Amino acid sequence: MIGGRAPKYKWRPNHDGKTKSIEEAYQIARRWGVVIPDYVSFAIDKYGWLDEDTTAKTTTFKEPAGTMIYWSSLFHKKTGKIPFLIRKDIMRSDEAIVAVIGHEMYELEEMRKAFGETGAPIESWQAEAHADNEGNFHWQAWDYADELVARMRGVA
């Protein structure tokens, strides 16, 4: 089985054991340099839909091969924002919060730059987000997340 790219750091839990809110998570991530656009929203996965290998995710497209996906397709019709679910346990670690939100925002921004103006077939979007495609946006996003955690620890 192919393992895919994952973060190199094991995120440390908060010393006080406190679980952060989404609002606190935004503040923490931004404090460490993560840009979170106003058109993005995060919600905690309180129902356990995300498995242990999925720290966060946005819209999943299940369209047939060759379907063109446009930037506008990512936006929720009612909220006008790109929604992300974040795994509940992530909220117990500032390092995890910064890494996961940083990862998602990096990956999203790279997708916007690559496909935002013209759209792309669904396979292109999937290839850049797949954990087993070495060097893709998903892998690059974990490198960025690792840099953020290294900075938090004072080792970068």
Image (tube, rainbow, N blue to C red):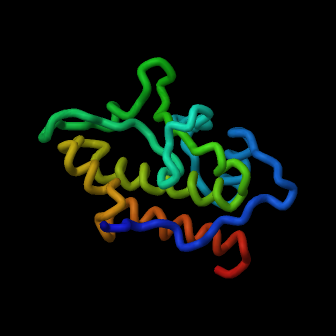
Residue at the outermost front position: 1
Question: In the rendered view, does 61 fall on the left or right side of 37?
Answer: left
Which quadrant does the C terminus fall into? bottom right
Can you see residue 105? Answer: no
Tell me which residue sits at (72%, 74%) in the image: 153
Quarter holding residue 93:
bottom right
Percent x, y for residue 148?
A: 61, 67
Question: In the rendered view, does 61 fall on the left or right side of 101?
Answer: left
Which is nearer the eye, 101 or 33? 101
Residue 112 against residue 150 in the figure, above or below: above
Tell me which residue sits at (37%, 67%) in the image: 3
Tell me which residue sits at (46%, 62%) in the image: 141
Percent x, y for residue 42?
A: 58, 38
Which quadrant does the N terminus fall into? bottom left
Tell me which residue sits at (53%, 39%) in the image: 85
Percent x, y for residue 130?
A: 32, 56
Residue at the outermost left position: 66
Residue at the outermost top position: 78
Quarter holding residue 15:
bottom right
Residue at the outermost bottom position: 155
Which is nearer the eye, 154 or 56? 56
Can you see residue 1? Answer: yes
Q: How many marks?
A: 0
Which is nearer the eye, 118 or 96? 96
Residue 106 against residue 67 in the figure, above or below: below
Percent x, y for residue 100?
A: 57, 55
